[in-house]
Image (spheres, rainbow, N blue to C red):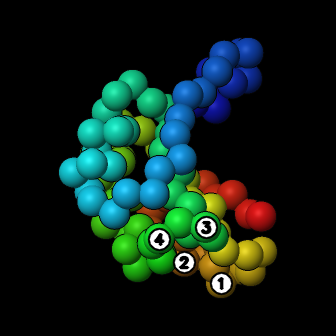
Amino acid sequence: MKEDLKKGGVALGAWISVLNPSTARTVASSGLDWVLFDTEHGPAGIETIDGLVGAVMGAGALPLIRVVWNDINAIKKALDTGAYGVVVP
């Protein structure tokens, strides 16, 4: 994805708030480059997101997580799930 962006390409993705790994996998496998889980405004915490990250990766999309706040521990926990990046509010 990074190389495509450097070349002027686009990366398509979606912010989702589902808690079901099967649904997350289905969304991720629809041709998206990335899927973002929002722990700031969404229904899931980091513990729940952990299982969803694997589902997204298995479908070939990059998992991203929006953390609750700009806190090093929240960022570390998000990255510990295997997410490829974080969005900090």
Q: Which SS class for mark 2?
A: helix
Mark 1 in CB contact with mark 3 (< 8 angstroms): no
Q: Residue at x 22, y 51 (%)?
A: 22
**Residue 43 - label:** 4
Residue reaching furthest to the top: 8
Instruction: Give above or below for 2 relative to 68.
Output: above
**Rendered location of residue 17, percent (x, y):** 45, 57
Q: Is residue 79 visible?
A: no
* Nearest to N terminus: mark 2 or mark 3: 3
**Callout 4 amino acid:** Pro
Q: Residue at x 45, y 30 (%)?
A: 32
Instruction: Give above or below for 58 relative to 9.
Output: below
* Nearest to N terminus: mark 1 or mark 3: 3
Label count reads 4
Instruction: Give above or below for 38 relative to 24.
Output: below
Residue reaching furthest to the left: 22
**Callout 1 amino acid:** Asn
The span from disc 1 to disc 3 (Cα, nearest Å) is: 18 Å
The span from disc 2 to disc 4 (Cα, nearest Å) is: 17 Å
Nearer to us of marks 1 and 4 is: 4
Instruction: From the viewer's side, name the closer residue of 22 and 72.
Output: 22
Q: Which SS class for mark 1?
A: helix
Mark 1 in CB contact with mark 2 (< 8 angstroms): yes
The span from disc 2 to disc 3 (Cα, nearest Å) is: 17 Å
* Nearest to N terminus: mark 2 or mark 4: 4
Residue topped by disc 2: 77
| Quadrant of the image containing the N terminus | top right
